[in-house]
Image (cartoon, grey):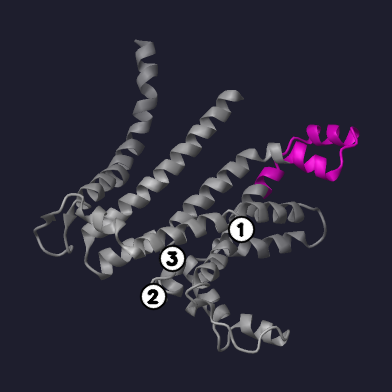
């Protein structure tokens, strides 16, 4: 009897969270998958069943493939955040006077809203009064004002730079936490063995920061795939859809164009991409834990 109670005890404690997870996560996912098989404007009481029609239309949509390309750019360039965050964490981990104030300045981007970040960088890039043009013109590097948010070829890169600002701060915080929990005995042993600074970093510090690195990469990639706020604030997907991504395209089709089924199909594709990525990293994490 006691063993049976022990077996079900953890399920009893997990039940409230599981129920909430099923209601607010699993059921909406199933409803979205089902909705993607219909053509529906979100207002009329009847839906028209189209089967895989939304997906066929999606794969023949040039804007969809442009959004996929932009999402790939977001993922690739966002992966700069962990190494930059690590470099900043190593710099800020020094015990010198005034370092706490410097830490707070680097921490600031993480605590402000993405909407504020979008507005700040929109002003920063403004060709009329933006600091970017003021700085470049002051150095004599340009004569004609730049308009990054109006350039089809450069707008995505400009928005990604804005997104990297708070993401680097997040990665920096993760690494600072990891640096504060390093095994001092290993560091002292490496110093006694005459390890150089690069050997200390590569062979002693980075292996101990592996959990922080894992979390930083996972969260960074998921954040890049979920990118929406900055695009909605800074460009609305323009110019000519050149900065759109899957999340914003889903919103635009569902809310602006009243095509809920088509938007659900985009959401399904994005969900599948994230699921494959998360499953891969969870499998990798489980294997690492088994090795330990």
Q: Residue 68 vs residue 165: left or right? A: left
Instruction: Say which residue appears at 81% left-offset and 40% top-offset.
Output: 199
Tell me: residue 291, above or below residue 269.
above
Q: Which mark sits nearer the N-terminus, 2 or 1?
A: 1
Label disc, if present, on residue 229 of the rendered structure = 3
Residue, x 49% and y 66% (percent of image)? 114
Cα separation, mark 2 vs mark 1, equals 29 Å
SS at mark 2 in the image: loop
In the picture, the quarter occupied by the C terminus is top right
Marks 3 and 2, the one that precedes in the sequence: 3
Q: Quadrant of residue 100?
A: bottom right
CB of mark 3 within 8 Å of CB of mark 2?
Answer: no
How many angstroms separate mark 1 from mark 3 (CA)? 17 Å
> Which range is magenta?
176-205
For the residue pair 161 and 24, the one nearer the viewer reads as 161
| Left or right, 13 with reference to 54 | right
Image location of residue 192, percent across then percent down: 90, 33
């Amino acid at each position: 009897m006691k063993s049976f109670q022990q077996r079900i005890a953890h399920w009893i404690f997990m039940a409230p969270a599981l129920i909430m997870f099923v209601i607010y996560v699993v059921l909406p996912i199933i409803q979205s998958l089902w909705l993607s098989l219909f053509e529906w404007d979100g207002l009329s009481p009847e839906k028209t069943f189209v089967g895989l029609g939304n997906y066929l239309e999606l794969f023949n949509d040039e804007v969809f493939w442009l959004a996929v390309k932009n999402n790939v750019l977001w993922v690739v360039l966002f992966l700069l955040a962990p190494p930059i965050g690590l470099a900043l964490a190593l710099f800020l981990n020094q015990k010198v006077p005034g370092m706490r104030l410097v830490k707070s300045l680097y921490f600031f981007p993480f605590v402000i809203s993405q909407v504020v970040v979008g507005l700040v960088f929109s002003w920063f890039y403004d060709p009329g009064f933006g600091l970017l043009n003021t700085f470049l013109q002051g150095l004599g590097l340009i004569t004609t004002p730049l308009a990054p948010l109006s350039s089809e070829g450069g707008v995505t890169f400009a928005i990604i730079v804005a997104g990297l600002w708070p993401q680097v701060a997040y990665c920096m915080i993760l690494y600072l936490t990891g640096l504060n929990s390093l095994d001092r005995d290993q560091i002292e042993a490496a110093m006694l063995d005459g390890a150089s600074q690069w050997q200390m970093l590569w062979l002693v510090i980075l292996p101990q920061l592996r959990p922080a690195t894992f979390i930083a990469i996972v969260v960074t990639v998921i954040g890049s795939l979920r990118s929406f706020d900055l695009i909605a604030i800074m460009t609305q997907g323009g110019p000519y859809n050149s900065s759109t991504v899957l999340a914003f395209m889903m919103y635009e089709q569902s809310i602006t164009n009243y095509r809920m089924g088509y938007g659900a199909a985009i959401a399904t594709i994005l969900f599948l991409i994230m699921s494959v990525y998360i499953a891969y990293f969870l499998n990798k994490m489980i294997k690492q834990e088994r090795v330990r």
